Amino acid sequence: MEHPENNEEYKGLTVNSGVEQPSIVNPYLKRMRVKRRELSAAEMVEGILKGNVTVLSQAVTLVESVNPEHQKKAQEVIDKCLPYSGNSVRIGISGVPGAGKSTSIDAFGVHVLDRFGGKLAVLAIDPSSERSKGSILGDKTRMEKLALRKESFIRPSPTAGSLGGVARKTRETIILCEAAGYDKIFVETVGVGQSETACHSMVDFFLLIQLAGTGDELQGIKRGIMEISDGIIINKCDGTNVDKCQMAATNFRNALHFFPAPDSGWLPKVLCYSGFYGLGIKEVWDMVYEYIDFVKANGYFDYRRKEQSKYWMYESINEHLRNSFYNNALVGQSIADAERAVLCGEKTSFAAAADLLDLYFGSLKK
Ligand code: GDP
């Protein structure tokens, strides 16, 4: 039997002209492929001062880079932006995962922009993102309404390095954002571990998001973090949860009585709200701005910022020394042996440390 495709009448393999195709789907593609010329530090500063978001993002990327050349350029940009910074209200927002930080920041951000105008930058300190190779905080998709506002700049946490390093980068990013005209800065942090302390050292008001019924308020587990909080807000005060939240608020208020009076002279407040349903948001921001007015009037606002600058000077020195030590070639060659000697009891920790430090300081003299 003859194969049907051998029949002259068979049209299956005939190529017909199809729909006319455009030469290129995206006419701008070629233009986009052109490698962007790298901006000089002065050009970056100029762009930042004009509020150019693309340039600001590039500068933040530079700040976050571990490349020494980038770091040098970043420092130049930061130095030049410094005189234009400081003119903002910086708010730290902390809470355990699931407390509702993203939901609340979305609601808070839209509220403050609608109510006070201006521009808002949302930054984060999340050292755990180092492990996940990508920030779990500051993700734009979790702040959907705010991400749509052109007055907002949302940036995930820097990912590389120690908590101190991550926090320093966030602090430097604050400077760039302020120079770019962001007059409200939110710094988000996970309420587990040490990152709250780092966050506290760069904000004017530290807001702690709590949930009812976690037992924290009764057991005082989070004593340290409660002590540094200027306001404690209990989220998810909606539906059947309202009574529980109000009871938790009373417990927190009682617990706060046992803490020493803060230097600011401000007695931390405890409020209930619902980030998801948008209930009680105005009251939270009445409190924050009442505090800002209060501490600006009594001088504590300036005092706290100066103390923070001092703290960051020492932090920078510590970090620089630590990096210099651990990146030292001689130390690098000997540190594994020293660790082994300590583990098998050949040397005490102190002797091993002293030997390594001798090696380090010795290498500096050469
Ligand atoms: P984060 O991990 O602290 O950033 O918390 P999320 O903002 O992602 O919220 C964690 C979960 O709590 C989500 O399922 C939210 O929808 C829910 N949630 C957040 N705020 C509220 C609230 O005010 N009320 C209620 N009922 N649920 C909320």
Image: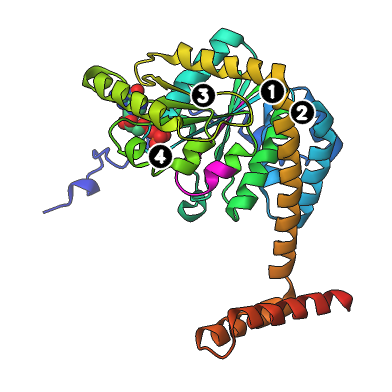
Q: In which quarter of the image is residue 219?
A: top left
Q: What residue type is labelled 4?
A: Val
Residue 310 in magenta?
A: no
Instruction: Report the residue marked by disc 2.
Output: 85
Of the numbered discs 4 and 1, the one sitting upstream in the chain is: 1
What residue did someone put label 1 on?
A: 88
Structural distance between the alpha carbons of marks 3 and 2: 23 Å
Ligand 1 within 8 angstroms of badge 4 C-beta = yes
- Quadrant observed for ligand 1 in the rendered image: top left
Say which of 340 and 45 sits in front.
Answer: 340
Instruction: Give me the C-alpha separation between circle 3 and circle 1.
Output: 20 Å
Furthest-top residue in this view:
115
Secondary structure of the residue carrying numbered label 4: loop
**Where does label 4 land, which residue?**
96
Q: Is residue 203 left or right of residue 74?
A: left
Q: Give the Cα distance between marks 3 and 4.
A: 22 Å
Secondary structure beneath dot 2 equals: loop
Q: Name the residue under label 3.
A: 147
Q: Residues within 10 Å of mark 3 (few under 14, many from 20)?
A: some
Residue at the farthest right position = 366
